[in-house]
Image (spheres, rainbow, N blue to C red):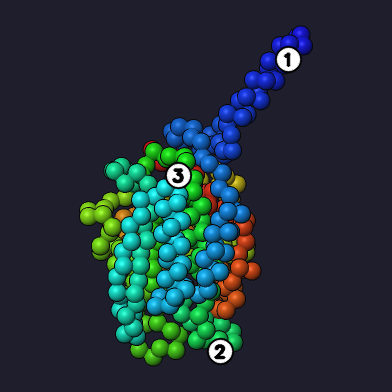
Amino acid sequence: MNRKYLLILLGGTLLAAMACGNRARKPADNTAATHTPTVDVPLFNADSAYRYVKEQVDFGARVPNTPEHVACGNYLAEKLAAFGAVVTNQHVNLPAYNGTMLKARNIIGSYRPEAKKRIALFAHWDSRPWADADPDATKHYTPVLGANDGASGVGVLLEIARHLQTSQPALGVDIVLVDAEDYGAHRAYTGMHREEYWGLGAQYWARNPHVQGYRARFGILLDMVGGKRAIFRYESYSQEFASSINKKVWQAAARLGYADTFVARTGGLVTDDHLFINRYAGIPTIDIVPYSEYSDFFEYWHTVKDDMDAIDRTTLQAVGQTVMQVVYEEQ
Ligand code: AHN
Ligand code: ZN
């Protein structure tokens, strides 16, 4: 082989590598033997997602009827618009369990709204008014910063939105940021604890979607997806309503090397936004929500320690890349 040929070969390899760009490619050796064509999936940037989590937390607790909540809502709508989404705001007054009228705002960012085949991605953007699970009882009426419980799911979806602007998947995508998820009854409440006290914004959206007759092939809810050493199992309502979507997501995670984070075993039942989306909107929707044998969801759940120190980029990366793989592979 002469010198010139080697150079061309090398040059060709370099060019090919450059053409691939900053992208994660589906492994060529497809041992799962699915019929999914090879598809380029953009690389999820956990530093970027982390920044979007921090920018929300920097507003303070995002409790409905507070200026911090209003300011963060504006930030989220601006962010989605800046990432090229068609933004719909649902401003609605929703009564809480204790009679408080919540000025709620669901924020929806739509990509290719004209496309009939769609995927819906959900996260709640409010934070809990009271740290009623804090080990220190004097903190039980302090608002939760909600870095993990709220901001993490939204941060991951904003990073996905940034990619949706430049790389178009085959299906249209709606990013639905629901409000007033975490205004469920305080622990000390002596009345009936009803599941409908949670997920108020999701209940409203499921009964009044941002587009009349809205349909999506499936939905994925992200809740508390930024905790250290988080483990995700098949949540049981998700299994009841959308087991094939659980399988799709956990298989994608395994192919990406995240089988230790996405453990393909059944977890518990979680009363979360997806329950109402399944029940009222009939969109098969799963919940990616942490499973723990030692605590509810994660160590600092509904405590004053749910701050940026509770956030781990490794978990954001595993969840974000997995959801992107599923979104970009869907045909
Ligand atoms: C219950 O505590 C019944 N469900 C958890 C819903 C939730 C709260 N998700 C985040 N914060
Ligand atoms: Zn919560």
Sequence order check: which comes first, mark 2 or mark 1? 1
Which quadrant of the figure has residue 273?
Answer: bottom left
Q: Amino acid at mark 2?
A: Ala
Q: Amino acid at mark 1?
A: Leu
For label 1, the SS is helix
The location of residue 41, given as percent across then percent down, is 51, 40
**Disc ID at residue 165:** 3
Q: Quadrant of the N terminus?
A: top right
Query: Circle 1 is placed at which residue position?
Result: 6
The location of residue 224, given as percent across then percent down, is 51, 65
Direction from residue 61 to residue 172 in the image, left or right: left
Q: Quadrant of the C terminus?
A: top left
**Disc ID at residue 137:** 2
Q: Amino acid at mark 3?
A: Gln
Disc 3 and disc 1 in contact, CB within 8 angstroms: no
Sequence order check: which comes first, mark 3 or mark 2? 2
For label 3, the SS is loop
* Structural crowding at the residue carrying mark 2, measured as other residues with C-alpha within 10 Å and reported as few (<14), some (14–19) or many (≥20): few
Direction from residue 327 to residue 259 in the image, left or right: right
Distance in Å between CA atoms under marks 3 and 2: 45 Å
The location of residue 92, given as percent across then percent down, is 29, 70
- Establish if 240 lies above or below 39: below
